[in-house]
Image: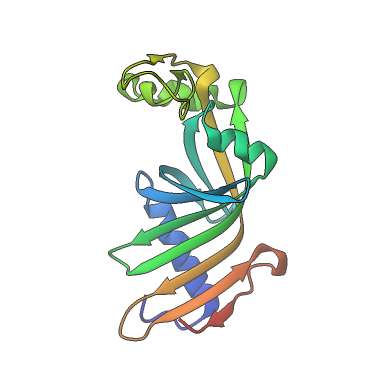
Amino acid sequence: MSDAPTLADFHGRAWASLEAARGALIAFATVEGTVPQVRSLVLRRASAAEALCEVHTDAGSAKVANLAINPRAALLLWDEAAQVQVRLGVEVETLRGAEVRALWERVPEASRSAYGKDPAPGTPIADALAYRLATGLDNFAVLRCHAQTLDVVHLGDDHRRARFERADGWAGQWLSP
């Protein structure tokens, strides 16, 4: 990215990093009350054209409950090959039920155990295995993250940083890295 001469090119390359990162671990940060919470989630989809990313989660998780109260979150990706950090400020839309059925049907059987525990994830239990699997479509949620801000840092011979906002049509502003 060291040859990125324009804000538009820098913006495009940041989204290219996100789109290429399908299956990568990203940091997903929310606020629970007044306490920041950060989790590692797998990036399932990114679309520059739609300015969004998607992740999957257990519908019974605390993050889903938190997002119902405050649908704002931040996502962070480090692209090692490109030496780029991409940070998104997002508004999260939680999708469940019939609208995610097609995605649920593509989840491999071995991976479905990640979606559905009884009691819900984070609930105190008597011992390490005092829960049961309760997998199924009802326990699967897709978090569709609509980008509002994009902060990109490239580390190289010449460090670069820029911030872009949906509100101004993603025009962008160079920032000191």
In the image, residue 139 above or below residue 76:
above
The residue at the far right in this view is 167
Q: Position of residue 133 (x, y in %)?
A: 39, 15
Q: Tell me if 103 is positioned left or right of 167 in this view.
A: left
Q: Which residue occupies the foreground of this view, 69 or 16?
A: 69
In the image, residue 24 above or below residue 89:
above
Q: How is the image coloured?
A: rainbow
In the image, residue 61 above or below residue 43:
above
The residue at the far front in this view is 126
Q: Tell me if 31 is positioned left or right of 57 in this view.
A: right
Q: Position of residue 168 (x, y in %)?
A: 71, 69
Q: Tell me if 47 is positioned left or right of 26 in this view.
A: right
- Report the quarter where the C terminus lies: bottom left
- Report the quarter where the N terminus lies: bottom left
Residue found 41% across the figure and 43% down from its top: 41
Residue found 30% across the figure and 85% down from its top: 157
Q: Which corner quadrant of the image does residue 131 belong to?
A: top left
Q: Position of residue 143 (x, y in %)?
A: 55, 38
Q: Position of residue 130 (x, y in %)?
A: 36, 15
The residue at the far left in this view is 81
